Image (spheres, rainbow, N blue to C red):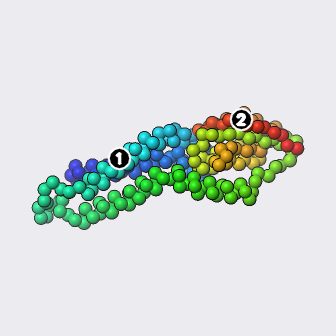
Amino acid sequence: MDKSKALRKATLGGSVLAAITASLCCIGPLAAVALGAGGFAASAVFEKWRPVFLGVTFALLALAWYLTYRKPKAACEQGSACATKPVAKWNKVVLWFATGFVLIAAAFPSLSSAILRFGQTSSDACCPLSVVTGANTAVLKVKIPSMDCAACAIGIQSTLRKQAGVQQAQVSFNTKEAVVQYDASKLSPEKIISVIDETGFKAETNTTTATH
């Protein structure tokens, strides 16, 4: 393999990897929910560095395009490696597919947020949090302003619902708020806030109310 082909593959592979890394802030929470894992605490870290990863993504992708479509400095001799047209065509096909994947991966946070936000709005409208009465039942409302996409809300909500003592939990990306109904004899507001913080998104206390 000549240096040009090796460089083209490296830049293309690097752009794909950088695009995926740039979107881990939203891919991570969804993957965690799908796998039944806890919160994806690194999400906030990846969001912080997302502009850098996107910059690297498109720089490498632009270089891959240049290396694929640049004109050779000299005409190729008949039968030489650079004159092998099927390989050149295959490289272009791979480049186009990789470009499509990179664009989708880079736009994933925005696309997923739009889809999930619409679904969450519909769900909240038709199925609001129902109050379960009980002597030890309490409701905690907290703000989570650092949530950067709807997938984060789903991840946090899934984590809360697995916590012992939590009766119901609803996390909305639209309002950046979590409403948790819990058994006060088994769980404290401080513990709930700690569980949210462990997902990588800091909770800010709003109100706590008891219901009977």
Q: State the residue in front, 175 or 47.
A: 175
Say which quadrant the C terminus sits in: top right
- The reply, left or right, for residue 45 in relation to residue 17 is right
Q: Position of residue 147 (x, y in %)?
A: 60, 43
Left/right placement of residue 17 relative to residue 206 reads left
Is residue 159 among what the camera can see? no
- Residue ranking furthest to the top: 190
Of residues 170 and 174, the one drawn nearer to the viewer in this rendering: 174
For label 2, the SS is: strand
Quadrant of residue 121 within the rendered picture: bottom right
Classify 10 Å Cα crowding around label 2: few (below 14), some (14-19), many (20 and above): some
- Outermost residue toward the front? 175
Height in image: 98 above or below 54?
below
Q: Is residue 203 visible?
A: yes
Q: Is residue 103 left or right of residue 170?
A: left
Element type at mark 1: helix
On the image, the x and y values in percent for residue 163 come to: 70, 43
Label 1 sits on residue: 59
In the image, farthest residue toward the bottom: 86
Alpha-carbon neighbours of circle 1 within 10 Å: few (<14), some, or many (≥20)? some
Q: Residue at x 50, y 41 (%)?
A: 46
What type is the residue that disc 2 sits on? Answer: Thr
Please identify the quarter of the rendering in which residue 118 is found.
bottom right
The quarter holding residue 182 reads top right
Q: Which numbered circle lies on residue 205?
A: 2
Query: Which residue: 57% across, 44% down?
Result: 148
How far apart are labels 2 and 1 at the CA level? 42 Å
Residue 30 coordinates in the image, percent (x, y): 57, 51
Q: Which residue is drawn at the image coordinates 72% and 57% (left, top)? A: 125
Type of amino acid at the residue the image marks with label 1: Ala
Q: How many marks?
A: 2
Res. 98 mark: none
